[in-house]
Amino acid sequence: MVNFRYKQAESVVEADFEAFGELLAKADGFYRNKNGKGNDFLGWRDLTVLPESEEHDRIKKCAARIRENSDVLLVVGIGGSYLGARAVIEYLKTPYHNQLKNGNPEVYFVGNSFAGGELNTVLSLCEGKRVSVNVISKSGTTTESAVAFRILREYMESRYGKEEAASRIIATTDANRGALLSLAKTEGYECFVIPDDVGGRFSVLTAVGLLPAAVAGVDTDALLKGALDERASIFACDLSHPVYKYAAFRNIMLSRGKTNELLVSYDPDFRFMGEWFKQLFGESEGKEKKGLFPSSATYSSDLHSLGQFVQEGSPIMFETIVRPVNGDKNSPVIPFDNENGDGLNFLSGMTMDDINEKAMMGTLLAHRDGGTESVIIDFGGKDEYSLGELIYFFFAACALSGYVLEVNPFDQPGVEAYKKNMFALLGKPGYEAGKEELLAKINAI
């Protein structure tokens, strides 16, 4: 079970949690009974893909086929259609997984920007290698991904011919409708489902995240088992479960004028988990002029850029430190040096993980003394089961925290505004009316 250690935050006492007790109990009811705002998108709560399910078996078989016939998998998607998968792969297999010769295909994520240079670079890395594509989109019309897939579809068909290209393209999309599903049926692509009741930012434990992760060699059975066990621990407990404490703590901090949560890890491999966290909480809570701004940092490296601000800057934030309890058994040991020119013999015999742990506690104390509250989320370690537990913990915490904040944690009405402007400027049919007004505003800037 994931644990939340909040007593490092000296200013928070049990009475502060009790003040949020009524809202937390109400949020718990929405979570358990599926009767709150956005309840149509609570499919992740019970996991739509289970370890023993036919869908999971099909995902694993498809991943095995890709691993056998491909050297590269290109994953096309944006937001929740790629962040979770990339986070899982980079944390468990390191950001260098594509350079490691471990028998797994290289996995590259594209279609998450309009930067043509990035796509050209990835295609150059595919030269002389066998390629498969997994395009992920609920509708098939998300512009960044649709543009990239149009280019990749032409690339695959010109390289392999239509028939073989179709066997190498896998679509993860809506079960019943949408442009991508229609294309997939016409061309004969194998399809996996994005469930109707699971939003993109909660989709990493569906085919959206499981297929790319399985191709990269992640044990998805253990990942799902960890999530299921964390779910069971929450349902077997009352409001004293760590997930409720964390959800309440975030709102306590917000009520005190803290506007920013800084998610901190001392492992560089966790960086994309921080990116995933930012979408999960930012898109879920940032509405009605409410919510904490989610940010992330990797210590100790970011202490050399952000440490001064966290220590003595504007008191707008608190830190949530994510800490694996079981360290790396193969962590390098600091050797003894007879010359001791660098003065580091006092560290000889220690592992780098030992130093990392002391750096964490020293930093926590310094930041606390400087007025920045720090709390700790403990989880098992760098393995699939523990990561599954942590992912589900954040899922539940996000839903509960959003309900305490009294917003709908599962919609995202604000993300459409930039798209309307972009489509008008690009001349998309149906958006012509706003183009001249936008151009006039741009010229006035």
Image (spheres, rainbow, N blue to C red):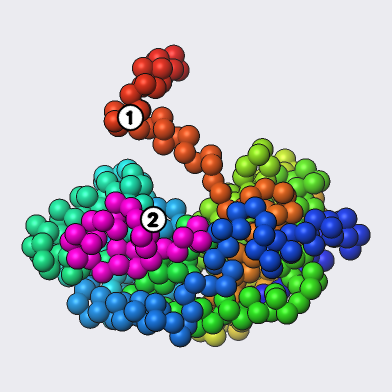
- Residue ID for mark 2: 138
Instruction: Please report the residue visible at 72 percent of the width from the left and 40 percent of the height from the top.
Output: 314
| x and y, in percent, of residue 31 in the image | 68, 64
Instruction: Please report the residue visible at 63 percent of the width from the left and 77 percent of the height from the top.
Output: 230
Quick one: which residue is furthest to the right in this view? 15
Front residue of 266/79: it is 79
Instruction: Please report the residue visible at 54 percent of the width from the left and 42 percent of the height from the top.
Output: 413
Which region is colored magenta? 171-199
| x and y, in percent, of residue 131 in the image | 20, 67
Q: Distance between the residues labelled 2 and 1?
A: 22 Å
Answer above or below: position of 442 versus 39. Answer: above
- Residue ID for mark 1: 430
The amino acid type, in three-letter code, at marker 1 is Gly
Q: Is residue 299 visible?
A: no
The amino acid type, in three-letter code, at marker 2 is Lys
Instruction: Please report the residue visible at 31 percent of the width from the left and 77 percent of the height from the top.
Output: 63
